[in-house]
Image (spheres, rainbow, N blue to C red):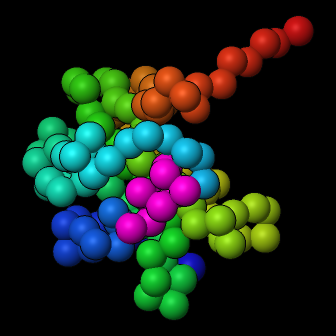
Amino acid sequence: MQIQPIQNKYENEIVDLILNIQQKEFNVPVTLEDQPDLLDIENFYYKPGGIFLGAFIEEKLVGTIALVKFNSEAGAIRKMFVKKEYRGKEFQIAQQLLEQLIAYSKEKGIKDLYLGTVTLLQVCFTFL
């Protein structure tokens, strides 16, 4: 597996991966029109100082993660998706994507990371 920064060169693969997971797996009523960032990765993610990473197996995009930078010390984790058949401990793709995003954030001086998600997928944690 290889993880690398990606831009709109991979637009079709990115859109296909993310929309299929959102719409078909999780039944989130979201469209491409609701996510204009997917068609303008350079301006939405890179120009403010963020990044968009892709995980590839045999040159096939199987996972993504992105960072939207809010200011010099804060950003949001977005677009974290892995194809169903590549999830789990066997591949550890999500873990590796997250670790690379965290390393990038530290390198850029970002101290606070927030998880960006839709309301439908929010999870509440209770610690005892």
Q: Quadrant of residue 6?
A: bottom left
- 92 relative position to 83: left or right: right
Q: Quadrant of residue 59?
A: bottom left
The image quadrant where one finds the C terminus is top right
Give percent across and percent down for residue 101: 45, 49
Query: Residue at the bottom extreme?
Result: 58
The image quadrant where one finds the N terminus is bottom right
Give percent across and percent down for residue 120: 55, 28
Task: Name the one closer to the observer, 49 or 7.
Answer: 7
Give percent across and percent down for residue 24: 55, 56
Task: Name the one closer to the observer, 60 or 76.
Answer: 60
Give percent across and percent down for residue 83: 58, 66
Give the residue at x 51% y 72%: 62
Give the residue at x 22% y 46%: 33
Range drawn in magenta: 16-24
> Which SS does the magenta portion mostly show?
helix
- 74 relative position to 70: left or right: right
- 104 relative position to 10: left or right: right
- 59 relative position to 88: left or right: left
Is residue 104 visible to us here?
no
Is residue 83 visible to us here?
yes
Query: Residue at the right extreme?
Result: 128
Task: Name the one closer to the observer, 16 or 99.
Answer: 16
Label count reads 0
Give the residue at x 54% y 83%: 57
Residue 5 in the magenta stretch? The answer is no
Give the residue at x 68% y 72%: 85
